[in-house]
Each structure stands twice: as structure tokens, then as C-alpha cells.
Amino acid sequence: PQPMPMPYTPTPAPYTPMPQPMPMPYTPTPAPYTPMPMPMPMPYTPSPAPYTPMPMPMPTPYTPTPAPYTPMPMPIPMPYTPTPMPMPVPTPTPICTHCNHSQKAMEDLACNHTEESIQVCNTYSACYNKQISAWRTTRTSICGSNGTQNALRNELYLIMKIQCLVNALNASDATRDAQIQSCISSTEAQYDLSAASVPGCNLTDPSWQSTEYAPCEQMQDVSNYTFCSGTPAFAAEYYRYIVAPLAARPCESECCITPPTPHTAPTR
């Protein structure tokens, strides 16, 4: 048998502090001050830098850019729907077949009369223009500055001047030279040249035959000619006795379809 172990009980050693040395008192020892030498400053001499202007950029020309035109939208119009009107009921017109044929024949006759009258007046104008032109041309060729009358007067003047020289040569010696010089320097005004005048050169253009031309004046505008079918004046003249319920039928003559060309007056 083993003996029972004794319980362990530690025995602390007694604490003995170690002695500390006494600190020495601190006496600071200042280091001697030695100033650092400063460099001598250099004298300042400003050196102006040369002025070099900075280059300016070339301005870009201004070109306005128009804003694009954008039209404002227009409102869509509302469709127009007309209100239908009731169809009028025509009043029956009595039909007269014989009257219709007679009216058509009368209107055709009136239209033919108007067209033939215009043609006659146009022929008159053409004839007048031709004859008056021939008259003026003939008168100028005879009585003009370069016409026959002046040529005859010049010839007569030369003949009378020659006769003057012949008479001067037959004069006496004392007056011969003077008469010759007088003949040479003489002018037309010193001679009677009436024998070379052409009768009729004092006449002017023939007078205008206004009475003769009077019927053609109304042919210059036939839009309301009394004797031209289809005009208001024709209807007022020939349909004035037609009363309801009768009525004239629409005009069907050539003048109503294509109005005739008016007459052109002659040149005066």
C-alpha cells in the first residue's frame, strides 16, 4: 500500500525590494550660437521681355443659316354638303311646231343678212384703203419734192437760163459780159416757171364720205344689232308680241352659236 500524498502548500518567500540609486540633478548645457553666413543679394536689373502680340485668329464670316420653314398645319376644312333643292317642276309650254319652224327660218335669215352686211362693209373698207393709198402714192410721185412737177420745173429753169445766155451773147459788146454774169447768177425765183406746174397738186385727200359709210358704222359692233339674231335688240324687236303661255324657243342660228366678227373700219 502506498502512503497518501500530502497536500502541497506553497510557502511564499519574503519580498525584499532592491535599493534604487539617487537620480542626478539635470543641468542643461546650452550650445554656443553661431549664425550662418547670408549670401550677398544680387542687384535687381529688370530686363523687359520683348512684346510679341499673340496672333488673332481670322474671324469666320457670318453666314446666317435660315431656319427651315415649317408651315403650320392647316385645319382640314369640313366637307361642304349642299342641301339639295327640290327640282322645280316646269310649267308646260304649249308647243307650236309651225311657230318653231318659222322662228328658225327668221333667225337664220337675220343671221345671213348680218354676215353679208359685214362682208360688204369689209369690201368697202378694203376698196377705200386701196384707192386712198393709190391716190397718195400718185400724188407724191407727181407733186412731191422728187416728183414729176419739180423735174419739169428744173428743166424749164435750165431752158430759160440757156435762153438768157443766148440773148446775152447777142447783146452789144458793152453789155454782153454783164448780161452773161447776170444769167449765170440767176435763180429759179427770177423766172416764171408756172408753165411747169401740174394741175391738181394743190389738192388734198378726198373728203370722207360719211353719209355713204353710215350704214357700215353699225356693223363695227353687232353685239346688240337689231337685225342680228340672238341679240337683246333682236329679241325686243321681234319677240315683243309673244305673250304667255307662249314663249320663243332658244335661238339656234349660226350667229347665236358663234357671234359674227365685227366689221373693221377703213384707215383714214
Image (cartoon, rainbow, N blue to C red):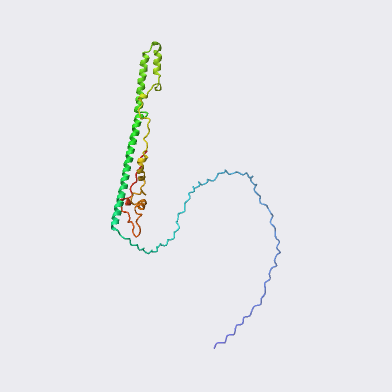
Give the residue at x 35% y 31%: 139
User: Residue 212: x, y in percent?
Assistant: 35, 40
Against 248, is 135 above or below?
above
Up the image or down, 235 lies above or below 4; here it is: above
Say above or below: 121 vs 181.
Answer: below
Q: Residue furthest bottom?
A: 1
Image quarter hosting the N terminus: bottom right
Q: Please give the count of numbered marks on the rendered protein.
A: 0
Residue at 36% in and 20% down: 160
Q: Quadrant of residue 178?
A: top left
Residue drawn where x is 29% and y is 54% of the image: 102
Image x and y of residue 183, in percent: 39, 17
User: 34 or 253, which lies in front?
Assistant: 253
Q: Nearer the viewer, residue 181 or 190?
A: 190
The spot of residue 3 in percent (x, y) is 57, 87
Q: Residue at x 30, y 52 (%)?
A: 106
Q: Position of residue 85 (x, y in %)?
A: 38, 63
Quarter that holds the C terminus: top left
Seen in the picture, residue 123 relative to 199 is either above or below; the reply is below
Q: Quadrant for residue 117, please give it.
A: top left
Seen from the viewer's position, the closer of residues 235 and 60 is 235
Query: Farthest front residue?
Result: 241
The quarter holding residue 15 reads bottom right
Q: Nearer the viewer, residue 241 or 213?
A: 241
